[in-house]
């Protein structure tokens, strides 16, 4: 019988929703699923993983060198564990993308990156060329390493009660060390899993305008904030807000693009949203080609009006 | 100190590619090709390190058909010192694992202290090669770098992660992969383009390194994604909110 090891995405004291989505992909493979929680003082995350529906067992590896998800340490833990598994699955988050290819190389197998569907246990669908082509790829190899585009899969239910087992990590590799993190703190929903995303582009012109014009609309909607690369490069907003081919891929129920032209690299990160709204003063902007609702308007007028309308509507 | 910079020739980022009917692949005939944008950033970073006195030599390496030499020349024009071209048959698919194995052979021969490469190629979007190379070499990796600072025997790499930024210290030798904010690559000047033509460029074959490049994965077919139809234009914010509520049902 097929066995799957799912690498959990977590912050030691909480499980990231990406884990539950990758689990939904893993369940389509069939077979027993064990979730690996590698971290330090990560019992809370392990307990949350044990509640995900469809998990047979949670493996906890707790050691100081695993605290920050260093690729060298995490891969050294996973590679020997893979002797007992057929497939390693991880969400295609920054940390999944960092660790998995290192494991694949050690196992001498090709990784299948960023899958959007499971056709069968060895065959997967994945977008290439910024989502302008879809590849169906089969892996005939003895072991498989797969990363999952989480926006393409639903969250798993949380009615499970898997057993939690400790696994002893190998001694620290010691090639790398964590120095510091500068994380963006926000009370808003997480960009990758939010129901509504409000994104701004170069048209916003400044960081102050993001705050003054875009944030009040996001607040009314309980939305996550996103941005185009141009807005990030110009320093209006931090890098973790970039949506697109080389940033985050999102598929919310509602995506509102304001002052964003709609370059293919941006579209690659949001065109699977259920409903897309574009506000742009240029009626020819390519974003309108994918928008369900387009408003040709100056954003500095439209956004305050939108805020007022939403307020009127009880938001 | 030597820096190795792998560079890949890819479809230019401005091109909207076409999928061939019948699921056989991408129509690449007469399509504009360029250096992978993340690799331009990698070359630029290596050149800046050298200009600051941190490196003595930069070697650009590309794996691909004969035309990949153009990409190496571009790297030489930005400021790399010499090139290595590992020639593969036209149209041959070389997977990241094979690329990483070939690069490992080059590293074994050239003994660089740092390999700087792109975080992902914008054609196949694998985002694997650097991590695989680091794994094969047993070197530390600093992926998605937005800042690289050299130190005694180590390198500090600030990485773009999902929640913001994170800084790691890696023992050298190390592998670094570039993200968009690391630097803004220069345009090579005409004199530098001319000079690049005279810089040494060595050609090799995968067989010279004993690396089998046969793909491990089988691409069964390639299709066009379902396209989204343009919707409607609304005339006012009030109409927009009304439609989102009643028609789309998302508010
Ligand atoms: C390797 C590579 C990777 C990339 N990855 C990404 C990625 O992941 N994500 C991404 O987004 N981009 C990415 N890009 C960049 C992409 O090609 C575009 O340059 C970028 O998306 C443009 O951002 P923008 O739409 O905000 O800016 P612009 O294209 O400059 O558009 C600004 C828009 O704002 C409108 N506007 C201006 N003022 C107003 C106003 N007052 N009211 C209303 N509208 C107004 C304009 O009409 C215009 O349409 C990448 C590029 C490369 C080369
Ligand atoms: C339909 C199709 C047709 C293809 N046709 C060809 C083809 O004709 N020729 C071809 O070479 N590839 C072709 N490829 C791509 C090839 O299969 C691999 O995807 C590619 O060599 C490595 O994957 P990547 O670039 O996505 O890796 P990534 O891991 O995303 O690349 C990251 C970085 O690794 C380095 N790197 C990757 N590849 C090379 C390289 N070849 N030389 C030097 N540095 C490199 C670069 O620094 C790059 O930024 C094709 C892919 C598809 C889907």
Image (cartoon, rainbow, N blue to C red):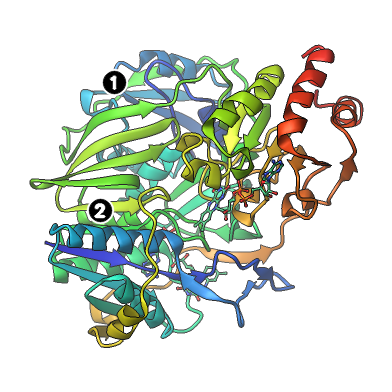
Instruction: Name the quadrant of the N terminus of chain B.
Output: bottom left
Select label 2 or label 1 by which is in front. 2
Task: Indicate the position of residue B249 as horizontal and vertical percent values.
Answer: 85, 26
Callout 2: helix, strand or loop?
strand
A304 shown above or below B162: above
Displayed quadrant of residue B54? bottom left
Residue sitting nearer the eye, A86 or A280:
A280
A96 shown above or below B225: above
Task: Indicate the position of residue A1 as horizontal and vertical percent values.
Answer: 50, 40
Callout 1: helix, strand or loop?
loop
Q: Determine the residue positioned at 63% across, 35% down.
A: A199
Task: Indicate the position of residue A2 as horizontal and vertical percent values.
Answer: 50, 41
Task: Indicate the position of residue A62 as horizontal and vertical percent values.
Answer: 28, 22
Q: Residues within 10 Å of mark 1 (few under 14, many from 20)?
A: some
Left or right of B206 in this view: A88: right
Left or right of B10 in this view: B49: left
Q: Give the spatial CA distance, label 2 vs label 1.
A: 26 Å
Task: Identify the residue under disc 2.
Answer: B175
A113 shown above or below A138: above
Residue sitting nearer the eye, A55 or B128:
B128
Task: Identify the residue under disc 1.
Answer: A40
Residue sitting nearer the eye, A59 or B142:
B142
- The chain letter under disc 1 is A
Displayed quadrant of residue A10? top left
Asked if residue A209 can be seen in this view, the reply is yes
């Amino acid at each position: 019988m097929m066995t799957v090891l799912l690498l959990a995405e977590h912050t030691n004291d909480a499980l990231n929703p990406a884990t539950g989505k990758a689990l939904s992909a893993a369940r389509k493979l069939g077979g027993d699923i064990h979730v690996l929680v590698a971290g330090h003082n990560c019992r809370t995350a392990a307990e949350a993983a044990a509640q995900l529906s469809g998990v047979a067992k949670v493996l906890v590896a707790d050691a100081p060198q695993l605290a920050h998800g260093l690729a060298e340490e995490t891969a050294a833990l996973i590679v020997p564990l893979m002797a007992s598994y057929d497939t390693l699955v991880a969400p295609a988050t920054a940390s999944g993308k960092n660790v998995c290819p290192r494991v694949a190389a050690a196992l001498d197998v090709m990784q299948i990156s960023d899958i959007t569907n499971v056709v069968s246990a060895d065959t997967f669908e994945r977008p290439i060329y910024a989502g302008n082509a879809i590849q169906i790829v089969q892996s005939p190899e003895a072991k498989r390493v797969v990363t999952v585009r989480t926006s393409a899969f639903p969250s798993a239910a949380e009615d499970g009660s898997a057993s939690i087992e400790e696994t002893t990590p190998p001694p620290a590799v010691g090639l790398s060390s964590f120095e510091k993190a500068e994380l963006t703190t926000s009370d808003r929903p997480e960009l990758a899993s939010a129901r509504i995303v409000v994104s701004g582009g170069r048209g916003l012109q400044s960081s102050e305008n993001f705050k003054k014009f875009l944030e009040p609309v996001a607040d009314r909607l309980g939305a996550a904030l996103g941005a185009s690369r141009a807005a990030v490069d110009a320093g209006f907003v931090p890098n973790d807000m970039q949506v697109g081919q080389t940033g985050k891929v999102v598929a919310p129920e509602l995506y509102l693009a304001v002052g964003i032209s709609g370059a293919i690299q941006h579209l690659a990160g949001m065109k699977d949203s259920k409903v897309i709204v574009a506000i742009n003063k240029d009626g020819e902007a390519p974003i309108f080609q994918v928008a369900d609702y387009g408003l040709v308007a100056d954003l500095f007028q439209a956004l305050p009006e939108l805020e007022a309308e939403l307020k009127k509507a009880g938001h | 100190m030597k820096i190795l910079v792998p560079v890949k020739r890819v479809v230019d980022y401005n091109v909207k590619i076409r999928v061939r009917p019948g699921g056989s692949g991408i129509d690449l005939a007469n399509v504009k090709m360029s250096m992978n944008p993340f690799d331009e950033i990698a070359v630029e970073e290596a050149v800046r390190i050298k200009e600051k006195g941190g490196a003595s030599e930069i070697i650009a390496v590309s794996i691909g058909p004969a035309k990949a030499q153009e990409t190496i020349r571009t790297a030489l024009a930005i400021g790399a010192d010499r090139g290595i071209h590992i020639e593969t048959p036209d149209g041959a698919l070389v997977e990241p694992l094979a690329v990483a194995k070939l690069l490992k052979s080059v590293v074994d021969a050239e003994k660089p202290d740092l390999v700087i490469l792109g975080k992902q190629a914008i054609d196949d979007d694998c985002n694997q090669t650097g991590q695989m190379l680091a794994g094969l070499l047993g070197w530390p990796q600093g992926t998605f770098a937005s800042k690289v600072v050299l130190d005694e025997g180590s390198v500090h790499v600030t990485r773009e992660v999902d929640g913001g930024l994170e800084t790691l210290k890696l023992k050298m030798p190390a592998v670094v992969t570039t993200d968009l904010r690391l630097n803004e690559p220069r345009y090579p000047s005409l004199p530098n383009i001319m000079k690049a033509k005279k810089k040494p460029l060595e050609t090799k074959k995968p067989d010279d390194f004993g690396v089998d490049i046969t793909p491990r994965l089988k691409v069964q077919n390639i299709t066009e994604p379902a396209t989204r139809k343009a919707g409607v234009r609304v005339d006012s914010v009030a109409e927009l909110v009304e439609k989102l509520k009643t028609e789309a049902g998302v508010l």
